[in-house]
Image (tube, rainbow, N blue to C red):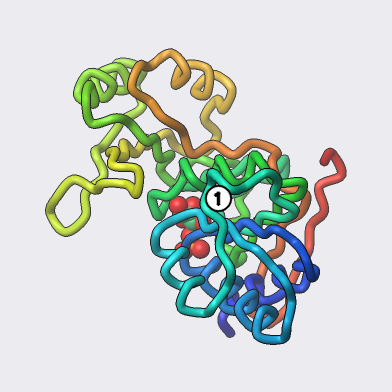
């Protein structure tokens, strides 16, 4: 049973004709984007804003009409994956390195849905590394600050090279451990020059949609949104 596909396809049911939709990034969002492509084939007049170059390429291939970020005035619904999420809807995102565009689009949306397989639901976030997007210029100094805070940072690499985001920046991954002090870390990140964005997405979603290995789909509403 493909849990990511279950969640992605379920989320596409929330897309209505005429909406401006934020299209997330990653292997779960991939299935949602395919399902949105099917809606377009059916005749839905959707416009979409992709959160990465990879999603943009997939959406183009499927014939989904796209907006550039400069053309966006509002987003009705954003659907995206997560790396970890706790019962208070505190999420870590950016495993795929798209956190900056993902946060811009989510912050513009009237409603946000996070989609995931059951492994992403945790009691406390932090076993997964927390991604931080940093400018190349000054990244060594930013890295040193993160070390000094005791966050065990690592520069993200891909194929033996430093990973470069769609925005031309680096990613530093913090290894904080489950149960870290979320507000303290968030505040301290804000003091580091060169940080473009962090992967903490706190209480941003209206609901989570979780695919389970037994083939069921769980929908968890956030009463505080
Ligand atoms: C990319 C993300 C992804 O949404 C997150 O990493 C989840 O990915 P996947 O659905 O492949 O497990 O934040 O930056």
Q: Nearer the viewer, residue 89 or 42?
A: 42
Tell me what residue is drawn at x 80 percent, y 68 percent.
16
Picture quarter with the C terminus: top right
In the shown orientation, is residue 8 left or right of residue 96?
Answer: right
Q: Position of residue 88 (x, y in %)?
A: 72, 40
Q: Residue at x 51, y 71 (%)?
A: 59
Task: Kindly identify the residue that appears in the image at 54 percent across and 44 percent down.
Answer: 70
Query: In the rendered image, is residue 4 in sight?
Result: no
| Residue that label 1 marks | 84
- Picture quadrant where residue 145 is located: top left
Whether 199 is drawn above or below 120: the answer is: above
Residue sitting nearer the eye, 215 or 79: 79
- Establish if 46 lies above or below 180: below
Q: Secondary structure at mark 1?
A: strand
> Is 137 drawn above or below residue 110 in the view shown?
above
Q: Quadrant of the N terminus?
A: bottom right
Q: Position of residue 187 (x, y in %)?
A: 52, 17
Rendered location of residue 34, percent (x, y): 57, 78
């Amino acid at each position: 049973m493909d849990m990511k596909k279950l969640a992605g396809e379920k989320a596409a049911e929330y897309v209505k004709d005429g909406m401006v939709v934020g299209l997330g990034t990653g292997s779960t969002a991939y299935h949602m984007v395919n399902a949105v492509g099917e809606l377009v084939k059916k005749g839905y007049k959707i416009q979409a804003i992709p959160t990465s170059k990879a999603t943009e390429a997939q959406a183009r291939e499927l014939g989904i009409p796209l907006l550039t970020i400069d053309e966006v005035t509002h987003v009705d619904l954003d659907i995206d994956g997560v790396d970890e999420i706790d019962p208070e809807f505190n999420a870590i995102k950016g495993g795929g390195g798209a956190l900056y565009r993902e946060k811009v689009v989510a912050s513009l949306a009237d409603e946000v849905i996070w989609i995931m397989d059951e492994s992403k639901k945790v009691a406390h976030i932090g076993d997964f590394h927390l991604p931080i997007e940093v400018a190349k210029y000054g990244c060594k100094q930013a890295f040193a600050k993160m070390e000094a805070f005791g966050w065990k940072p690592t520069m993200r690499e891909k194929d033996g090279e430093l990973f470069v985001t769609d925005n031309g920046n680096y990613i530093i991954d913090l290894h904080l451990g489950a149960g870290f002090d979320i507000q303290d870390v968030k505040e301290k990140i804000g003091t580091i020059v060169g940080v473009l964005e962090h992967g903490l997405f706190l209480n941003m979603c209206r609901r989570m949609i979780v695919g389970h290995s037994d083939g069921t789909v769980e929908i968890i509403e956030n009463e505080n949104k």
